[in-house]
Image (cartoon, helix red, strand yellow):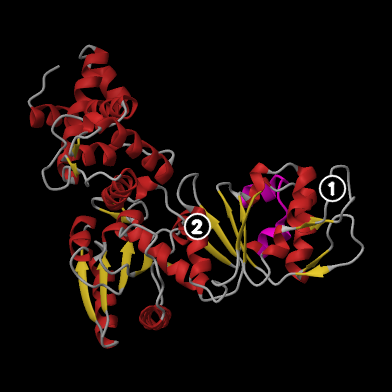
Amino acid sequence: MALILIIDDDTNFCGTMESLILRMGHDCLKAETLKQGMEILATRDVDILLLDVRLPDGNGLEWLPQIKEKSISNPEIFIVTGLGDPDGAEAAIQEGVWDYIVKPTSVKQTKLSLTRALKYREEKKSKKQTVAINLDRIIGESPVIKQCFESLTRAAVSNAPVLVTGETGTGKELFANTIHDNSVRSLNNFVVVDCAALTESLLESTLFGHKKGAFTGAADKRTGLVKLADKGTLFLDEVGEMPLSTQKSFLRVLQEKRFRPVGDSLEISSDFRLIAATNRDLHAMVKKGEFRQDLLYRLCAVQLRIPPLRERGPDIKKLAMFHVNRLCDDYQVPNKGFEQVFFDTLNAYHWPGNVRELFNILETAFVASGYEKTLYAMHLPRAIRIQVAKASIQRGADRPHGLETPETGLPTFKEFKHLMEIKYLKKIIAETRGDVQTILKRSGLSKSHFYSLLKKYNLKV
């Protein structure tokens, strides 16, 4: 028996769906607001979420990242909306939703789609129980990183090419290495090719090797990295930097697993598994003619997106403690403690350089702390503390007074509306110097409505 949650303020739709779900033999919970729904998702093991787009306290599509981060069960998500929007459907699918449903919907079709989603979920749960993956080298327990683990598991148990994407410093090579270590090729080589560090003239020689005397400077025969990866894994780091001419050559190697070293007349073979990584948008590069579309299709049989550190809030503390403890071991000093404000500052920073930047900053703080037993925010670089302080002050300046609530940091929709009405009225009265005719013309309000608002908020013109 599955648990299905409906977040929708349309009572007729909720009633129809609840009746269908109960007839299917499953449990159903309902919430009219995102706030209510989030409370359920944070405490209950929900299998499927039916999520409306337009809700009293927000847009369901915009809340998808928070739902994935804070739900304890990572449910399969159906977007349901009364107004179909192609861009909304694209955004939803990009976020990994199961289906995008436009009301009114066929009960029969909805039942079929729910059944398929539940079957998929059961198979996914069963696979999780049977596949054991060693993730000791990857630190993190946030919902977004757990989703990466699912993709990593699928990649590890297959032999298909993998495309790892993510910003600089997110740990793409670490994830690629983890895929290799958990694959059937783990006892063989994991060969790294840094495409960004190689010139076009050297890339083919580095990949495919060369015969002695093939070109000026080729004093000896050289085995290429593709051959070194035989029976193992070839990791193309920053594959988006590979020149178009080499892309064409490499495409044939991917298809045939055969190639000719530079200057040689004989072909040799290599049975390698390919993992590529990039911080660039290869699809956009294809449109600009900067990357071959046929090669992109070959690279991304399995895709793994590594989230930036700013999306992994719960992991920052764990990563910091792990790295500082490792530094203590390296420097042979006792483990250090942490002041809470130290973690608060780390959590408030944007981390454009991601995990790599975090580790560099932590080492700076570690060195600054010397033989002190505790790391304080004062040990962090001043540039970091200044940015965090400025951002905090700016957020305070941008937030209208009275909008905060202790529970959510936001008011109710009704409270927000009242505050904005007051702010609007005060501004238009000041700009028009209280001229009622000008106010009515600019605001579009009727005279009676305008005066009722003045009375409601105790304002004068």
Task: Please indicate whether residue 151 sits to the left or right of residue 2 in the image.
Answer: right
Disc nearer the start of the sequence (1/2): 2
Can you give x and y, in whole percent of width and height, for residue 203 in the image? 75, 48
Q: Which mark is residue 169?
A: none
Q: Main secondary structure of the magenta part?
A: helix
Residue nearest the viewer, comparing 96 with 158: 158
Q: Alpha-carbon distance for marks 1 and 2?
A: 51 Å
Residue nearest the viewer, comparing 178 with 59: 178
Residue at image coords 25%, 81%: 19
Residue at image coords 22%, 62%: 37
Magenta-drawn segment: 282-298
Observer able to see residue 81: no
Work out whether 329 lies above or below 397: below
Quadrant containing the N terminus is: bottom left
Quadrant containing the C terminus is: top left
Q: Which residue is mark 2?
A: 90
Q: Counting other residues with Cα less than 10 Å from the Cα at mark 1, is it few (<14), some (14-19), or many (20 or more)?
A: few
Mark 2: amino acid = Glu
Residue 284 part of the magenta-drawn span: yes
Observer able to see residue 406: yes
Q: Which residue is mark 1?
A: 218
